[in-house]
Image: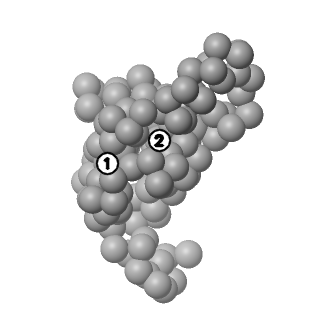
Amino acid sequence: MCSLASVAKQESFGRAGLMALSACIAYAACGQRWCEVCQSDVDKAESTGGIFSRNIMTDLLDMLKLLVESSKQHFNVNYRRRVCENVLEAVSSVICTSDVPLETLMHFFSTVPREFTDYGGMQGYS
């Protein structure tokens, strides 16, 4: 999933490409829950305290933040909402909030447009 998210840092995407990338990342993140894990991966995760290290989680949030920022270039609010939903779904599936510094989490969530985070912010767009 980290490799997939890093594509956002390396490539420039149009509207359809950005939507497809965010959907692929969300799908890959949700698949993390159900994928089969070999015993060596389980042992490695137990010895490090989790599947991903703190640095990898921070890097992943930075890469996903680029997707949210890129979606802000498009005027269609429903398009931005769908990209942000995919990114937030990926984050909630993979990242344990207790394993990431609070400052990093707050910085990530500050990139999500307020119309999606404020109470009642999307009422006119549903």
Instruction: Please name the residue that numbered disc 2 is placed on.
Output: 22
Determine which of the numbered discs, if any, sits on residue 65 in the image. 1
Is disc 2 placed on a helix, strand or loop?
A: helix
Horizontal and vertical percent position of residue 95 = 50, 46
Q: Which amino acid does label 2 sit on?
A: Ser
Location of residue 3 (image quadrant): top left
Which of the two discs, 1 and 2, labels the residue nearer the N terminus?
2
The image shows residue 74 at horizontal and vertical percentages of 30, 55
Question: As rendered, which of 95 and 68 lies closer to the eye?
Answer: 95
Q: Which of 99 and 34 is in front in this view?
A: 99
Q: Which residue is drawn at 42% across and 73% down?
A: 117
- The amino acid beneath tag 1 is Lys
Give the distance between the C-alpha atoms of the residues marked 1 and 2, in whole angstroms: 11 Å
> What is the secondary structure assignment of the residue under circle 1?
helix
| Disc 2 crowd, CA 10 A, few/some/many (<14, 14-19, 20+) | many
Colour pattern of the rendering: one colour
Q: Residue at x 64, y 40 (%)?
A: 30
Examine the image and state in which quarter residue 46 appears. Answer: top right
